């Protein structure tokens, strides 16, 4: 397959994967919004009738001429408590649904990671088969067992260990001058261990031994895939909430991304530090899901003064933030490669 066609295939696969993730994220966001409205409705339906009863009782006392009754102050205090609870309904409802949204997004990302790993493992199987069949002598075919043994768990996960070991046995016997010396000994894994030990013995007898390794003909990389692990750069975020920040940081923990985040809980005084440092970052995101209008406006103004581009993200979820970080950093990395 020519490189141009491979690149086209890879770009289509990436686009389809991104579209699937986007569609699932939209569904999650719709669920979140519907759940938010339901929680708000339920809490108002409980609290507003309670407030009305308390206010009616206060009015009854006053209508009866008991203006200074001690219980009136208790009723007024309770009414104020209920009013505060009603005023905090939107914030508390958002906290509940966004915590659940992050958990759903975690499951979505885990599924995406599993799909990538299974694709890599499937390609690994083909690379290992190619490696085994490429060996044209007895000792090289035996030595291939050392490389295969390093991928036992991956092969077991996709049920390909037996196929690879059978191919290894056949290739060793194909070039054996003493007939079919390789055979199944116990399980396929036990057989692989036996051949592996024979290969080590062969290596110990010479200083110039083959070091057979699978080529990445089908895999995109020798390394097992891990979401966001290949990202690097400095990212500055304004807005969002602390749970969102923690979730994003956890997802980027194995990357080389330096993340500075000023959430709404940090307040304007702390976010001012970030405003003064916008020139030091490769990517700037402003999340409006939780950010106050003043935080949003100040962050945008700081970027404009420094002639720094920024991206507005209207979400309360993790997936869109991670997508923006990934797309922004990869675009910058690609631009740097072209400029070299």
Image (tube, helix red, strand yellow):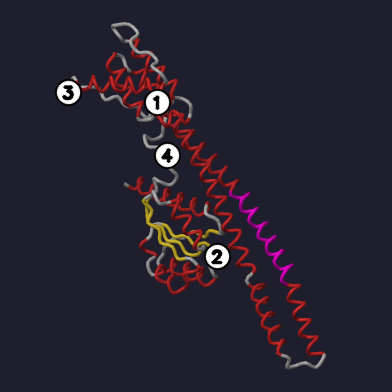
> Residue beneath label 4, please?
225
Residue at image x 55%, y 56%?
317
The answer to whether residue 183 is magenta is no
CA gap between label 4 and label 2 equals 33 Å
**Residue 253 screen position, x and y as percent:** 40, 51
> Residue beneath label 1, please?
127
* Upstream in sequence: badge 3 or badge 1: 1
Q: Residues within 10 Å of mark 4 (few under 14, many from 20)?
A: many
Residue range (magenta): 25-47
Residue at image x 48%, y 55%?
247
The image quadrant of residue 124 is top left
> Residue beneath label 2, please?
290
Helix, strand or loop status at disc 2: loop
CA gap between label 3 and label 1 equals 27 Å
**Residue 306 screen position, x and y as percent:** 40, 67
Q: Residues within 10 Å of mark 2 (few under 14, many from 20)?
A: many
Helix, strand or loop status at disc 4: loop
Residue 38: image tag: none
CA gap between label 4 and label 3 equals 35 Å
Between 68 and 213, the one nearer to me in the picture: 68
Extreme residue toward the left, this view: 207
Q: Quadrant of the N terminus?
A: top left
* Upstream in sequence: badge 3 or badge 2: 3
> Residue beneath label 3, please?
207
The answer to whether residue 33 is magenta is yes
């Amino acid at each position: 397959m020519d490189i141009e066609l491979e690149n086209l295939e890879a770009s289509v696969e990436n686009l389809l994967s991104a579209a699937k993730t986007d569609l699932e994220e939209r569904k999650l966001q719709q669920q979140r919004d519907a759940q938010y409205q339901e929680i708000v409705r339920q809490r108002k339906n409980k609290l507003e009738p309670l407030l009305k009863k308390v206010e009616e009782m206060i009015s009854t006392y006053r209508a009866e001429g008991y203006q200074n009754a001690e219980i009136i102050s208790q009723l007024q205090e309770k009414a104020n408590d209920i009013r505060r609870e009603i005023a905090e309904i939107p914030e508390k409802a958002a906290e509940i649904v966004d915590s659940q949204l992050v958990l759903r997004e975690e499951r979505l990302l885990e599924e995406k990671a599993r799909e990538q790993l299974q694709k890599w493992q499937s390609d690994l199987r083909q690379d290992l088969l190619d490696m085994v069949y490429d060996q044209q002598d007895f000792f090289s075919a035996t030595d291939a067992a050392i490389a295969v043994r390093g991928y036992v768990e991956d092969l077991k996960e996709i049920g390909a260990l037996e196929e690879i070991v059978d191919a290894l046995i056949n290739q060793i016997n194909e070039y054996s001058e003493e007939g079919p010396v390789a055979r199944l000994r116990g399980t396929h894994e036990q057989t692989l261990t036996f051949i592996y030990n024979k290969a080590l013995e062969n290596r110990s007898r010479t200083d110039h031994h083959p070091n057979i390794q699978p080529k990445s003909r089908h895999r995109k990389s020798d390394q097992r895939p891990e979401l966001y692990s290949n990202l690097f750069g400095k990212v500055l975020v304004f807005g969002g909430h602390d749970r969102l920040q923690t979730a994003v940081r956890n997802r980027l923990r194995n990357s080389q991304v330096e993340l500075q985040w000023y959430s709404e809980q940090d307040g304007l005084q702390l976010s001012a530090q970030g405003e003064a440092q916008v020139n030091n970052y490769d990517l700037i995101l402003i999340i409006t899901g939780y950010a106050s209008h003043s935080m949003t406006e100040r962050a945008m103004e700081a970027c404009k003064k420094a002639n720094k581009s920024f991206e507005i993200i209207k979400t309360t979820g993790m997936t869109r933030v991670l997508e923006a970080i990934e797309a922004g950093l990869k675009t910058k990395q690609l631009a740097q490669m072209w400029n070299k």
